Each structure stands twice: as C-alpha cells, then as structure tokens.
Amino acid sequence: MRKVILAGNWKMHELIEDGIALAKCTEQGVKDLPINVIVFPPFTAIHPVFNVLGSDSKVRVGAQNMHYEEKGAFTGEISPLMLKDAGAEYVILGHSERRNIFGENDELINRKVKSALSHGLKIVLCVGEKLEERENGKTEEVIKNELVSDLKGVAKEDLENIIIAYEPIWAIGTGVSAKPEQAEEVHKYIRSLLDEMFGAGSGSNMTVLYGGSVKPKNIESLAKMPDIDGGLVGGASLKCEDFVEIGRILTKVKGL
Ligand code: 13P
C-alpha cells in the first residue's frame, strides 16, 4: 500500500564511525514522525549502522546496489544474501549513477529486480530522464522504456515490495529540483503506466518518491503534489538536521 517515505541515499559518503553518528542522529530526529524512514549507507557501513539502530528501529536500512547472483566468481560484487546478512531490508536498483557511470542497462536491472524480490528484499527502483531527453519531449518515452523493461516478468503481487523513485537526472546533485508541477506530471504518468502494465488501481497503490535536489526549502511544494509520496534524498540526507527537517515538513504537508 501507498506510504509516505523519506529515504536517504548516502551514495559514496561516510566512513563507518561517521555513518553510525549520522544514523543515530537521524533516528533521534525522526523517532516521533509518523512516516517511514530508510537510509542507504555505503556497503561498508550497512552492518555497523544496522547494528547500532537495531532491528526494531524506526529507521530502516538498505543498500545502494547489488548483483543478482547469490554467490560466485563476481569479483567486487555483492549479493542479495550478503545484503540481508548485513541487515539490509531494501535495495536501490537502477539509480541513474549506476546506469550512466557504470553502464547498467535495463536487462541487467531487470535481473536484479527479480533477484531482489525472490530474496525478500524491498526495492527502490529509480527511473528518470536526461535533460536532453526532456528537451526533446522524450520524458514519457524514457520512463516507459525503463519501467516496462525493468519490471518485465514481475508479478502484480510483487508490487507491494517495490517503491518507484522518479529522479530526473538533470535535477540530481545540481541544486535545481524539478518544479513541483513537472514532477507531479511524471508521477501521474508513472501511475497510469503501472495501471496499464499491471491492471487498474496498481499505480495508485504504489509509493512513488521524487528525487533530485530535495532540500528543506523545496520539499513543501513538492510534497503538496498529490502523486508525490515522499523523497529520495541524496546530499541533504548527509546533514542530519536537514534530513530530519525534510521529514518534519513532509509529515506536516501530508497531514499525518
Ligand atoms: P541529490 O539529492 O543530491 O540531488 O541526489 C538525489 C539522488 O540521486 C538520490 O538518489
């Protein structure tokens, strides 16, 4: 079912001690907020962060990527079993940095999606267009291609374990977020596409987050949009105060 979620993608930031401190501060700050909070530390900090938060924490833990196999000769990769072993409950798949810097394609992402689901990991699946694609009127086409390919072979029942994050690439790390109306338009489109793919009502039941320069100063107007259920936050998730403040504003705007 649809939830209000605040997710923090720490990307390649935080050594173990700093990660623990950030997680503790985050937990303290959001403990009374009636929203769902997930942090995605780098691999090395997943287990220490999970250990210090504990399995009952309000702040859930996830990983930023994974390989689809359980084990094997895949030097430098990490498996779903290893992530679960370390305490991860979620995994981000298809982030644009994985797609664009590391060349992950939709076929690979689809394998990862199916593997994560079969191992009981919940997924945050990222989709989003480049600036050039937006300017050429290709936003919907790009989103459709990604969603259709990445979710190929996924059963309708599995959707409850998938969160979609719309992250326009031009808004990531740039300080320029999408305008609320621009984001809303795509979120609405994502839901209609999910209806088409999985049957009426599927889209409205899914949690769809916005990501791309989410900050305390812009979350209010983004969260006012009816199809935006929360944020996948990069840079501002590294600043405990900012991340917590985003959570407070999200709670208020969503009337929780
Ligand atoms: P920023 O919030 O730093 O723009 O990052 C967004 C993002 O990529 C989250 O996954």
Image (cartoon, rainbow, N blue to C red):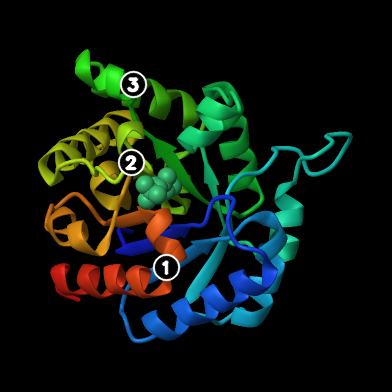
Earlier residue among tags 1 and 3: 3
Mark number displayed over residue 142: 3
Binning the other alpha carbons within 10 Å of mark 3 as few (below 14), some (14 to 19) or many (20 upward) gives some
List the single residue furthest toward the front: 175
For label 1, the SS is loop
List the single residue furthest toward the top: 136
Question: Quadrant of residue 52 in the image?
Answer: bottom right
x 72%, y 59%: residue: 44
In front: 98, or 70? 98
Residue 63 locus on image (x, y percent): 60, 54
For label 3, the SS is helix
In front: 199, or 6? 6
Mark number displayed over residue 174: 2
Does residue 221 appear in this view? Answer: yes
Binning the other alpha carbons within 10 Å of mark 1 as few (below 14), some (14 to 19) or many (20 upward) gives some
Identify the residue under disc 1. Answer: 239
User: Disc 3 beta carbon < 8 A from ligand 1?
Assistant: no
For label 2, the SS is loop
Image quarter where the N terminus lies is bottom left
CA distance separating discs 2 and 1: 17 Å
Does residue 159 appear in this view? Answer: no
